[in-house]
Image (spheres, helix red, strand yellow):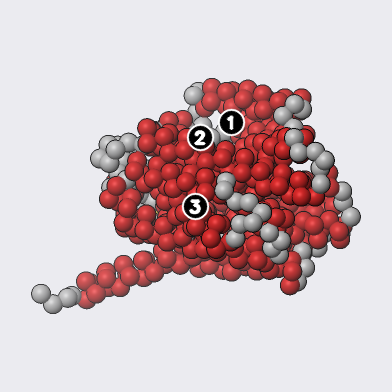
Amino acid sequence: MPQTSSDVAASAGAHTASTRRWWTLTTVALAQLMVVLDSTVVNIALPAAQADLGFSNGDRQWIITAYSLAFGSLLLLGGRLSDLIGRKRTFIIGLIGFAVASALGGAADSFGTLVAARALQGAFGALLAPTALAVLTTTFTIPKERARAFGVFGAIAGAGGAVGLLLGGVLTENFNWRWNLYINVFIAIVAIIGAALFVTTVKRTGPRPKLDIPGTVLVSGALFSLVYGFSNAETDGWDSPLTWGMLVASGVLLVAFVLWQRRAAHPLLPLSIVLDRNRGAAFSSVLIAGAGMFGIFLFVTYYLQTSLGYSPIQTGVSFLPMIGMLVLAAQLSTNIFVPRFGPKIMVPAGMTLAAIGMVMLTRLNLDSTYAADLLPALMILGFGMGSIMPASMQTATLGVDREFAGVASATVNTSQQVGGSIGTALLNTLAATAAADYVASHLPATAAVAAEAAVQSYATAYWWGAGFFAFGAVLAALLFRRRGQGLSLSSPHAAGAASDAPEPVIAH
């Protein structure tokens, strides 16, 4: 049967819409990369920034902590705002704010200005990160396209930290530490243009819901206290009253938040989102993977630079094979393995591979070589992380009503951020204790003893990281539903997110 003009027009319209979706993915991926890499890109620049601005070693941690505190505590608010005022508008506001904060930090002439800029970056990052994931969730509703899109997004979420280390090394060595912040301005400009052209505006068809102010205050206070408590443990130790005071306050505020959400007329985070078994398993997997990842980036970076004498650029390049395996695994996982086996198989398998890679890292010593000893472990870790993150992130946002896509996406980011804070504090403390014990048992404390103590402390962190991933494998295997139970990753109903809701009007 020959095609009619209406058939041709429909086919052309479908092709245009599909092309537009992939440009939307490119835009969202740029924004996500900017937010994720900014958590590590500044780390390598810290020594140069400290020398330039003249702040103390004790103050140095606040360059990192200011970002993580603002980011972690405001994520749920940022996600809900994207639901309330529109995702395209929120996305562009977040990009502009992040760019301005980055420019302010790059031009900082004092420690206080730099800390304030980093806090502003964290605040606008908390607006940007969940909105980016929500845009992806509501844009890709065709199961096969959704899988490919989340493969790309999950790869960026997993690899962004390592990309940040590489980029930070290149910018610091070849330009200036300030370019670690200025680079965001150029990325943001490209993303803003992409958002203006390709991200669609969803016109609300029903009444505008209200912001849950009490819930926002409670959960923001709880997340702030949680991140601050773990950050303080990293610097002042676990015997600090402030550490435990903040952690206890966080627990109390979280309980109060849950109780309030049960009775709130317009809840910030409907409890049904996190109590769904599959989504709860996905959030837990992202949290555990976030905790374990910091054992890779943090201590492998220390090992390469202090034990093997690598430069910042060499350190960043050393992570490239891991990134390559992560990207490969993410694409294979979302396009082939997850549709066939489901997250109940793929996430525990990824956790198991990551645990094996961490155990392999425990064998490193001062005589180890990169190709023979470190490279195989990094490649296995990369493949493991590429199996965990896309499947978990896709499952975490699957089937969520469009009205709450932003706050559900924020919960994914919150899980990763809290996991990173927990992992950094715990692993740093355990490593420091192991190093002190080794020196105490090998007196006198010569330079050789100190170097060996450092390697032993890294091994301790790797063993605990392996334990995190092993626990994650068991938990994911128990919690995720079997394929065919509940929402399916290949279900058009699930992917469309709440088909019983009125269909929104899309303005191009």
Q: Which residue is mark 1?
A: 215
The image position of residue 304, as x and y in percent, is: 66, 57
- Marks 1 and 2 sit apart, C-alpha to C-alpha, by 8 Å
Please tell me how crowded label 3 is: few (under 14), some (14-19), or many (20+) other residues with Cα within 10 Å.
many
- Marks 1 and 3 sit apart, C-alpha to C-alpha, by 38 Å
Q: Nearer the viewer, mark 2 or mark 3?
A: 3
The secondary structure type at the circle numbered 1 is helix
Residue located at (58% from left, 43% from top): 462
Please tell me how crowded label 2 is: few (under 14), some (14-19), or many (20+) other residues with Cα within 10 Å.
many
Q: Nearer the viewer, residue 294 or 445?
A: 445
The image position of residue 226, as x and y in percent, is: 65, 33
Residue type pointed to by label 1: Gly
Q: Is residue 114 visible?
A: yes
Q: Which mark is residue 381?
A: 3
Q: Which numbered disc flags the more N-terminal residue, 1 or 2?
A: 1
Relative to 215, 305 lies left or right: right
Q: Is residue 145 above or below residue 481?
A: below
Q: Is residue 133 visible?
A: no
Q: Which residue is mark 2?
A: 269
The image position of residue 483, as x and y in percent, is: 27, 41
Q: Nearer the viewer, residue 35 or 233?
A: 233
Q: Which mark is residue 34?
A: none
Are the two marked residues, 1 and 2, in contact with CB atoms closer than 8 angstroms? yes
The secondary structure type at the circle numbered 3 is helix
Q: Nearer the viewer, mark 1 or mark 3?
A: 3
Relative to 90, 472 lies left or right: left
Residue type pointed to by label 3: Leu
Please tell me how crowded label 1 is: few (under 14), some (14-19), or many (20+) other residues with Cα within 10 Å.
many
